[in-house]
Amino acid sequence: MVVDGIYYGLAFGAAAGAAWWLAGPLYAIPLFLAAVFCLYFFRDPDRDIPAGPVAVSPADGKVVSVRPESPSLTRVSVFLNIFDVHVNRSPVAGRIKEVFYKKGRFLVASRERASGENEQNLVVIEGDGPEVAFRQIAGLIARRIVFYKRPGDRVETGERIGLIKFGSRVDVLLGPEWDIQVRAGMRVRAGSSVLARRRPG
């Protein structure tokens, strides 16, 4: 479990105890439910990381878009609802080259406009092969993007690198060296679902 979940759970649990003591159990129930939900939301299960020249999904969720980002890049967009695991993982192994934070709006993250207009964190990885970038994008409810790494840090495929709280979106930008393996509507899991395989040569 992400440590944030323990803090939120304890806070709501303490508030529930106080409400029970001061006003009775009826007033405490919503706070107890909030505490349980926070413990569930911040879960962090282990994943089996596939081997080979692959790019894995950085997030649990539903693929909402596979489309050109530019003449040389394909964007794979994954939407996370509040019931998905929100721990983000590195799509490829390599070195963190750059991290760009951009302030923006908090549109519903499943909308196409969210990729360009919402608050986001763009991470560029110099992979053990081609360069790969991905965006952590805030959503309507998500108001905090967390990223654990810094430029120059080494990451492995499927390694935990951050999270986005309470509903969000992740975009992965892949060059022509990659053969996309997913399509819109598919469900993916962070670290274990293959988004693309690197073409030989």
Image: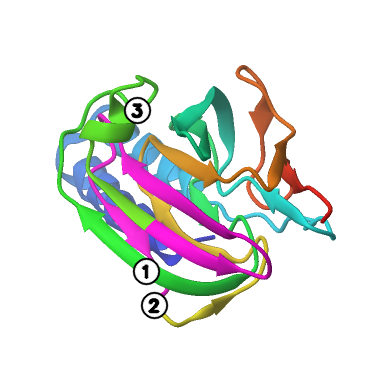
Q: Which mark is residue 109?
A: 3
Q: Residue at x 84, y 60 (%)?
A: 51
Q: Which mark is residue 108?
A: none
Question: Can you tell which of label 2 and label 3 is closer to the viewer?
Answer: 2
How many other residues sit within 10 Å of disc 1, few (<14), some (14-19) or many (≥20)? Answer: some
Label 2 belongs to which residue? 151
| In the image, residue 105 above or below residue 18 | above
Mark 3 or mark 1, which is nearer the start of the sequence? Answer: 1
How many other residues sit within 10 Å of disc 2, few (<14), some (14-19) or many (≥20)? Answer: few
| In the image, residue 53 above or below residue 155 | above
CB within 8 Å, label 1 to label 3: no
Q: Could you say which is closer to the camera, residue 163 or residue 125?
A: 125
Please state which amino acid type lies under the numbered disc 2.
Pro
Q: Position of residue 176 (x, y in %)?
A: 63, 43
Q: Residue at x 38, y 77 (%)?
A: 150
- Quarter occupied by the C terminus: bottom right
Q: Residue at x 58, y 39 (%)?
A: 60
| In the image, residue 113 above or below residue 161 | above
Q: Which contiguous range is marked in magenta? A: 123-150
Label 1 belongs to which residue? 98
How many other residues sit within 10 Å of disc 3, few (<14), some (14-19) or many (≥20)? Answer: many
Please state which amino acid type lies under the numbered disc 1.
Glu
Quadrant of res 143: top left
Mark 1 or mark 2, which is nearer the start of the sequence? Answer: 1
CB within 8 Å, label 2 to label 1: yes
Q: Position of residue 79 (x, y in %)?
A: 47, 30
Q: CA distance from mark 2 to mark 1?
A: 5 Å
Q: Position of residue 85 (x, y in %)?
A: 54, 43
Q: Could you say which is closer to the camera, residue 16 or residue 161?
A: 161
